[in-house]
């Protein structure tokens, strides 16, 4: 910008007058002050249970958009569920940081398998994974199942396989897990609640 | 002026009065240090709600992480190993803005509307108006504001003004799993704190008390301390006050400067009326031209 001596003086004078007016209580523009907009106003709320420990605190997940068909929801905030009887809105630091757990680049999203002697994991389908687990369980059970004890009494034990269940399950899911595991004869059965 | 969801009680570097006929309830955060287990859920919740992700820190021999408040860490669990009565005590204090009734930062701030105090007691920084001068740091008796190297603006705890404005409690309060953090009206918090102090005294903490320092007009973040007679154990100032330098600058120097400014304008005007502008004589101009040729 080219300024003549006269223009420079005019400009400096105007700036000085402006800032002096502001200092004397005649602001050029109103000092805008407002709190940050509440970011959850129209988000979609979904209830869930914190996946970490056995306390199973209730959480609410807030995702972007109102589930319109052209909207791709993305979780943008997670906080405690005030109506949840266990935690009544509170969370521990792990629960309070769940958002970064959800969006973590190292989060496991699908089953992976590393065959004996191989150096890396490869992605497998859920069907393949459940089939393989079922086959291994059956092989082991067929080999090691104990139907009767030394006295000839019926015991139906399967002692070579154990089951560690998750803790953050409903009573119904817990009932089904218990029935499935016990009906197979497994005795080594525990859940994460005691960890 | 945008729609205000919270009424403004005071604004930095502004002489215009703020609208003030509505009465809103004063709010307060109560930090009961005797109940805190130092889990840092409040720190995580604060980062999550305010969309802040600080750099991953390093271990310097304490659970405290990061080592100090930063522009992206507005609250911090501070861990103290002290021996006030001959035996070791592990004191854990949640540090952050105290939301003073007479905020030193607001007093010191020279940028119009960069620091505001809402009528419910929250002291908030409006970063759009911040010029990054750092006067708020000088003004703060608790050493709270931090200036970001990224955008040269000051940041600190907002007491989740965006949540409180719509009727919610701050994020840290909601997360706290031991109810060491409680939120409500200032009156309710003082009552709750008094109950807790009585309980602690009954349990042998003879000097338990409330930290709500009168030197800054009371605060909207109050502590229940086991050793209220020795706030230094928690690195809290015993009698916090706005720095006399800030008082001197804003209280005497600035009005005097304003007066001088007004006087010079007046003198300038009188000079214009009496003497008038300096006019260039025509004959002289002509002679100038002759000189040049």
Image: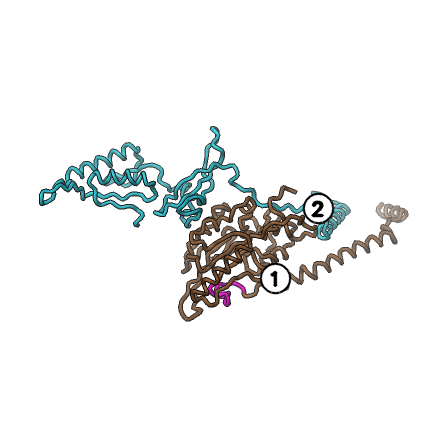
Q: Where's residue A160, x and y in %?
A: 18, 43
Q: Where does residue A68 sit, x and y in percent of width and height?
A: 48, 30
**Image quadrant where residue A83 sits:** top left
Give residue A28's mark. Answer: 2
Q: List the single residue furthest toward the top.
A: A69
Can the viewer see residue B187?
A: yes
Q: Is residue B148 visible?
A: no
* Residue marked by disc 1: B242
Kindly identify which chain the residue marked by label 1 belongs to: B
Query: Does A30 lie within the magenta span?
Result: no
Question: In this view of the protein, which residue sits in the foreground, B148 or A142?
Answer: A142
For the record, the magenta segment spans B226-237
Name the residue located 61 percent from the left edge and 63 percent from the top edge.
B243
Q: Give the label on residue A182, or none.
A: none
Left or right? Give the position of A133 relative to B1. Answer: left
Quadrant housing the C terminus of chain B? top right
Question: Which chain is the one coloured cyan?
Answer: A
Secondary structure at numbered mark 1 = loop
Q: Quadrant of the N terminus of chain B?
A: top right
Image position, residue A30 (x, y; %): 68, 45
Q: Which chain is brown?
A: B
- In reply to whether residue B235 is colored magenta, the answer given is yes
């Amino acid at each position: 910008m080219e300024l003549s001596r006269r223009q420079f003086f005019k400009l400096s004078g105007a700036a000085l007058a402006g800032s002096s007016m502001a200092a004397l209580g005649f602001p050029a523009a109103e000092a805008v002050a407002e709190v940050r907009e509440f970011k959850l106003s129209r988000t979609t709320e979904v209830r869930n249970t914190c996946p970490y420990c056995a306390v199973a605190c209730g959480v609410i997940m807030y995702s972007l958009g109102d589930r319109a068909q052209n909207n791709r929801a993305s979780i943008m905030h997670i906080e405690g569920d005030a109506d949840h009887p266990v935690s009544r809105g509170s969370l521990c630091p792990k629960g309070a940081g769940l958002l970064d757990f959800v969006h973590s680049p190292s989060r496991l999203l699908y089953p992976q398998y590393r065959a004996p002697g191989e150096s890396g994991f490869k992605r497998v389908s859920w069907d393949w994974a459940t089939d393989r687990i079922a086959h291994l369980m059956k092989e082991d059970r067929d080999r090691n199942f104990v139907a009767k004890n030394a006295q000839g009494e019926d015991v139906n034990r399967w002692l070579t396989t154990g089951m560690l269940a998750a803790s953050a399950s409903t009573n119904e899911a817990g009932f089904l897990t218990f029935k499935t595991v016990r009906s197979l004869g497994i005795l080594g059965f525990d859940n994460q609640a005691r960890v | 002026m945008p729609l205000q969801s919270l009424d403004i009680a005071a604004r930095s570097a502004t002489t215009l009065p703020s609208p003030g006929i509505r009465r809103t309830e004063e709010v307060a955060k109560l930090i009961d240090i005797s109940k805190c287990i130092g889990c840092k859920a409040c720190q995580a919740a604060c980062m999550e709600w305010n969309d802040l992700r600080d750099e991953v820190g390093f271990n310097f021999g304490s659970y405290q992480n990061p080592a100090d408040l930063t522009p992206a860490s507005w609250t911090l669990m501070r861990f103290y190993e002290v021996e006030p009565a001959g035996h070791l005590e592990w004191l854990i204090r949640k540090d952050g803005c105290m939301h003073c009734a007479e905020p030193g930062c607001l007093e010191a701030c020279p940028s119009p509307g960069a620091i505001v105090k809402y009528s419910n007691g929250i002291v908030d920084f409006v970063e759009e108006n911040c010029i990054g001068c750092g006067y708020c740091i000088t003004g703060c008796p608790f050493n709270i504001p931090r200036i970001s190297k990224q955008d040269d603006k000051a940041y600190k705890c907002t007491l989740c003004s965006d949540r409180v404005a719509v009727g919610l409690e701050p994020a840290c309060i909601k997360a706290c799993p031991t109810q060491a953090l409680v939120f409500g009206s200032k009156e309710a918090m003082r009552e709750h704190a008094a109950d807790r102090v009585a309980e602690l005294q009954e349990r042998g903490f003879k000097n338990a008390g409330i930290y709500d320092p009168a030197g800054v007009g009371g605060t909207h973040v109050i502590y229940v301390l086991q050793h209220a007679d020795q706030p230094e154990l928690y690195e809290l100032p015993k009698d916090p006050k706005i720095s006399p330098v800030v008082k001197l600058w804003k209280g005497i120097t600035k009005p005097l400067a304003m007066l001088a400014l007004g006087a010079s304008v007046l003198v300038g005007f009188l000079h214009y009326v009496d003497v008038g502008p300096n006019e260039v004589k025509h004959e002289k101009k002509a002679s100038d031209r002759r000189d040049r040729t």
